Image (cartoon, rainbow, N blue to C red):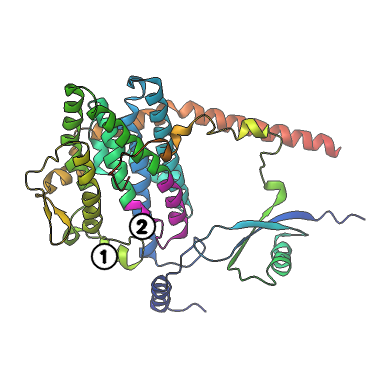
């Protein structure tokens, strides 16, 4: 005898409100599962596509040290995608299925990775700003109601901290350099500031899934709350470096203690997430190319596993005789 | 007469939100008996919410690898740690 669904959903909501974590074998409402699949797959794809803007600079890093740092960071991003695709699999989702959605250009991922990294300073901005935004977003997610997602987030946040610091360090070096290097840093900041603020997603009143996700404890804070936290943390860092925030309306509200910013261009945001950003096609075609060029590796691995199990079976037969 | 029972590795979860951890193993004739037996052997005192069992023969182990080489990851790669990068005085939230 199974309880009616409404009763189970009410009991489930009570578990969430008591702060209990949900594990993969637990019953969950279909909507909760779908919301998790949507959020975790977007997150996984973002980590995966996120390798590309910086990956471009691996062979162009200005020193062996910076190259090692960048390699380690890009490798971490691949690792983060792996943790998250595994968390998805705990929900009974096939990795291939969601990955094919990405390759087909139907899956969403963060707007920010559809912008190009035009100069070496952009590499610093990605680490400092984009990974800084990721930390603000993800630290609360390590208390998300779904256990496998929350645990993946703990590992990810520890590693993001390195990404954040190395990015700041890179930009710090540039601003201590020549006038041209300072200008390079300022230009990169001008390009990355606004897209980074969009990373937190649409304003609360236009965020269709947020309210339900917060009710389920999948998300803990609203987009605007997290965006404000990032701004308040980052503006003083920008000022410390002697750089200028590209926002004529920026001001510190002495009464609230919060920085107030000018309007965000949400039309640009929509355009970028709908596939019309500067690099959307390039990002997807790069992933498609890797998938196709890696086909022989997958085939060879399957062939090897097949041969090895045949050999083991034959050896077993001989042993038995 | 040896009974040819298989060994099963036992993992327990003390509360939701925390990963299962290995607690020991049991010998049993089949999966069902292994699960019941693990419950009897390992959960008599502490409060657990979940048990996972894996037949030991299916456990893949790094034993046999050269341990120092296999786990040599970060000794000369301090730059993978956030603390490698100095934070200038007066800068917060990095």
Task: Tell me the chain of label 1.
Answer: A
Is residue B44 rendered to the left or right of residue A181? right
Q: Residue furthest front?
A: B89
- Measured as percent of width and height from the top left, residue B77 is found at 49, 31
Mark 2 residue crowding within 10 angstroms, few (<14) / some (14–19) / many (20+): some
Is residue A41 rendered to the left or right of residue A183? right
Q: Which corner quadrant of the image does residue A19 belong to?
A: bottom left
Q: Which residue is mark 1?
A: A211
* In the rendered image, the vertical position of residue A151 relative to residue A61, given as above or below: below
| Residue A174 is at least partly visible in this image | yes
Q: Which corner quadrant of the image does residue A119 belong to?
A: top left
The label shown at residue A140 is 2
Mark 1 residue crowding within 10 angstroms, few (<14) / some (14–19) / many (20+): some
Task: Tell me the chain of label 2.
Answer: A
Q: The C terminus of chain A appears in which quarter of the rendering?
A: top right
Q: CA distance from mark 1 to mark 2?
A: 16 Å
Q: Residue at x 66, y 35 (%)?
A: B67
In the image, the segment drawn in magenta is: A137-158
- Measured as percent of width and height from the top left, residue A120 is found at 27, 26
Is residue A195 rendered to the left or right of residue B78? left
The label shown at residue A137 is none
Q: Say what secondary structure mark 2 lies in.
A: helix
Q: Which of labels 1 and 2 is toward the front?
A: 2
Q: Earlier in the sequence, mark 1 or mark 2?
A: 2
Along the line of sight, the residue nearer the viewer: A106 or A78? A78
Along the line of sight, the residue nearer the viewer: A272 or A304? A272
Q: Say what secondary structure mark 1 lies in.
A: helix
- Measured as percent of width and height from the top left, residue A292 is found at 40, 28
Along the line of sight, the residue nearer the viewer: B41 or A181? A181
């Amino acid at each position: 005898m199974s309880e009616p669904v409404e009763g189970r959903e009410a009991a489930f909501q009570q578990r969430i409100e008591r702060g209990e974590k949900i594990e993969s074998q637990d019953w969950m409402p279909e909507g909760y599962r779908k919301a998790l699949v949507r959020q975790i797959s977007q997150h996984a794809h973002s980590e995966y596509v996120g390798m590309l803007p910086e990956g471009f600079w691996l062979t162009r890093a200005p020193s062996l040290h910076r190259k090692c740092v960048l390699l380690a960071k890009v490798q971490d991003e691949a690792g983060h995608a792996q943790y998250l695709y595994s968390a998805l699999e705990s929900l009974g989702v096939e990795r291939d299925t969601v990955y094919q959605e990405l390759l087909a250009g139907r899956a969403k991922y963060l707007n920010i990775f559809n912008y190009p990294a035009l100069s070496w300073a952009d590499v610093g901005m990605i680490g400092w700003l984009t990974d800084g935004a990721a930390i603000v977003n993800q630290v609360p997610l390590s208390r998300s109601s779904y256990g496998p997602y929350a645990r993946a987030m703990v590992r990810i946040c520890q590693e993001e901290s390195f990404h954040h610091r190395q990015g700041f360090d890179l930009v710090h070096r540039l601003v201590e350099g020549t006038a041209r290097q300072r200008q390079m840093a300022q230009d990169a900041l001008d390009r990355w500031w606004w897209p980074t603020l969009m990373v937190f997603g649409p304003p609360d009143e236009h965020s269709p899934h947020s309210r339900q996700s917060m009710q389920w404890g999948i998300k803990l804070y609203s987009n605007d709350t997290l965006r404000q936290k990032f701004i308040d943390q980052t503006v003083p860092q920008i000022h410390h470096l002697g750089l200028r925030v590209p926002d004529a309306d920026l001001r510190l509200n002495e009464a609230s203690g919060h920085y107030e910013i000018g309007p965000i261009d949400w039309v640009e945001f929509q355009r970028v997430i709908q596939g019309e950003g500067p690099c959307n096609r390039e990002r997807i075609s790069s992933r498609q190319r890797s998938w196709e060029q890696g086909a022989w590796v997958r085939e060879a691995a399957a062939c090897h596993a097949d041969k090895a199990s045949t050999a083991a079976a034959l050896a077993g037969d001989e042993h038995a005789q | 007469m040896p009974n040819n029972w298989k060994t099963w590795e036992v993992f327990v979860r003390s509360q939701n939100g925390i990963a299962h951890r290995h607690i020991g193993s049991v010998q049993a004739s089949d999966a069902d008996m292994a699960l019941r037996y693990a419950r009897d052997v390992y959960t008599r005192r502490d409060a657990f919410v979940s048990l996972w069992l894996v037949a030991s023969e299916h456990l893949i182990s790094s034993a046999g690898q050269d341990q120092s080489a296999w786990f040599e990851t970060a000794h000369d790669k301090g730059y993978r740690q956030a603390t490698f990068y100095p934070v200038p005085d007066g800068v917060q939230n990095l």
